[in-house]
Amino acid sequence: MDSNKYLEDITEIKSMMSRSSRFISLSGLSGILAGVYALIGGYLGYLILYPSFWKFDTYEEIQLTLVAVALGVVVFAVLTAMLLTFRKAKRSGEKIWNVSSRRLLVNFLIPLGAGGIFVLLLLRLEYWMLIAPATLLFYGMACLNASKYTFGDVRYLGITNIVLGLLATYFTGYGLLFWILGFGVCHVLYGSMMYFKYDRR
């Protein structure tokens, strides 16, 4: 009897230590919605690259429109993640801004910031074929780097995006397709897994 209680106490202590070192208020639903935004953005990208509704006078207009769509997807995804994560943290009684969330944010933003600068340099040098692979690779590395401070599922999302980024680099003509798979389909799948695994408890 005493040994069972002792084991239960150890399990509880381990659980508390894990919760204190990891930010567990990430919302699976925000991942699903980010994927939906990316799928919409990918569809718009397809219409831009293969015009049926829109007509563009110059190649620069196409490029700027694609960048605007991508930025729109990012803004909507970030705002949704912030809103749903804040709501989940409030429900579970966890502070939204603590040591774990700061570590998560810093480790996520370092590779992501480097990737953003790299993509801007690609835009300046007009290496358009490498932009989709670069965004997938750096986003994957950001997820992988930040996964130590949140759910382990984020690690596999990162690895998947890195693999897709490498494939997109090799199959350069299919950048949009890999971008849709990485940011759209993968987010919906992993977000759904996290939602049913953690959010519905």
Image: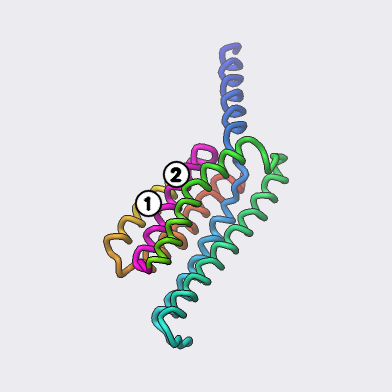
Q: Residue at point 50% right, 46% down?
A: 110
**Percent from the top left, x then y, of residue 132?**
39, 63
Q: What's under tag 1, amino acid-wise?
A: Ile
**Percent from the top left, x then y, of residue 190?**
48, 52
| Image quarter hosting the N terminus | top right
Please tell me whether residue 176 is drawn above or below residue 7 in the rendered image: below
**Percent from the top left, x then y, of residue 109?**
53, 48
> Is residue 154 highlighted in magenta?
yes
- Judging from the image, the colouring scheme is rainbow
- Density class for disc 2 (Cα within 10 Å; few <14, some 14-19, many ≥20) is many
Q: Main secondary structure of the magenta part?
A: helix
> Is 138 on the left or on the right of 29, as rendered?
left
On the image, numbered disc 2 is attached to which residue?
Answer: 144
**Percent from the top left, x then y, of residue 32?**
54, 58
On the image, numbered disc 1 is attached to which residue?
Answer: 162
Q: Residue at point 49% right, 76% down?
A: 65
Quarter of the image for residue 5 reads top right
Q: What's under tag 2, amino acid-wise?
A: Leu
> Is residue 175 highlighted in magenta?
no
Identify the secondary structure beneath mark 1: helix
